[in-house]
Image (cartoon, rainbow, N blue to C red):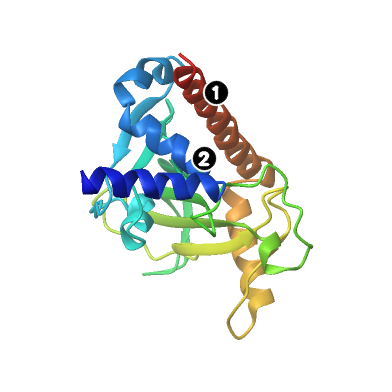
Amino acid sequence: MVAVLSLTTFLACRWRLGKTEYIMVQAVIEGLPDYQEEIESWGYQVSVLPRFTETAGDEGLLRYYWKSAGPVLVLTDPEGGRYCFYDGFDQYVSEIVKPGFVQVLYPEKGYVEAQRTVRLQIYKRNMDSAPFFENTATPGSNEYYDMVVRLYVRADSPENGQELMTLTNGYYETNYCSNNFVDCKWFTGITPEDANRYSDDTIKQEYSAEDLLGFYRQGLKLQEQLMGLYRERQSR
């Protein structure tokens, strides 16, 4: 009884703080059997990442473990892209493995065929706030750059599966404004402008600003669909 009262009080506090998106996501997770068929009719597989799940081997979802956040609602599209919902839409993750040519550094420089892995993460800098439909913060302020884009690139030999030494293997990350995914900024380091430019250039070689904005807006669209479905169920 005490646990139930504590949960009720906690949820009531979230409502008073304007956490409508959080309450909606948790309600959908709790009553998933009542929602799953409708959500799957949109073309997505539905799953739930429980709280404190380490997700070994799945770096795309590790941030929830690190921040002790969850449970998280995950909608996976037919291409394997995952839209994650915590306090509303929180993150998009995809991983693509495909053949391509890369410039290797060892044992001698040159272009070779490789199996390329490209993992993309687009996530809110502040997990505990709902995403912006329009970011009205002052351009140049830290709040204006509300989304993180993180890219991981790896090239492996198609013959033996060993990692190749290339110019582009590694992690690239910077902060973008969700209005356009053009305006970007890195905040720390010795040369933050150079670091930002290098990461932005590398990310944009794989995904254009239009691509990133499209993933973000699809996440917002799904959030609105989930909210509508939740309200429909609540009104019955």
Q: Is residue 66 above or below residue 96?
A: below
Left or right of residue 218, residue 80 in this image:
left
Viewer-proximal residue, 86 or 200?
A: 86
Measured as percent of width and height from the top left, residue 77 is found at 44, 28
The C terminus - image quarter: top left
**Residue at position x 36%, y 15% from top?**
37
Does residue 115 appear in the picture of this structure? no
Give the Cα distance between marks 1 and 2: 11 Å
Q: Is residue 236 above or below residue 17?
A: above
Q: Secondary structure at mark 2?
A: helix
Measured as percent of width and height from the top left, residue 169 is found at 44, 62
Question: Label 2 belongs to which residue?
Answer: 21
Does residue 163 appear in the picture of this structure? yes
Viewer-proximal residue, 127 or 20?
A: 20
Measured as percent of width and height from the top left, residue 66 is found at 33, 62
Q: Is residue 77 above or below residue 124?
A: above
Question: Label 1 belongs to which residue?
Answer: 228
**Residue at position x 67%, y 63% from top?**
143
**Residue at position x 39%, y 55% from top?**
155
Measured as percent of width and height from the top left, residue 63 is found at 38, 57
**Residue at position x 61%, y 62% from top?**
175
Q: Which of the two discs, 1 and 2, labels the residue nearer the N terminus?
A: 2
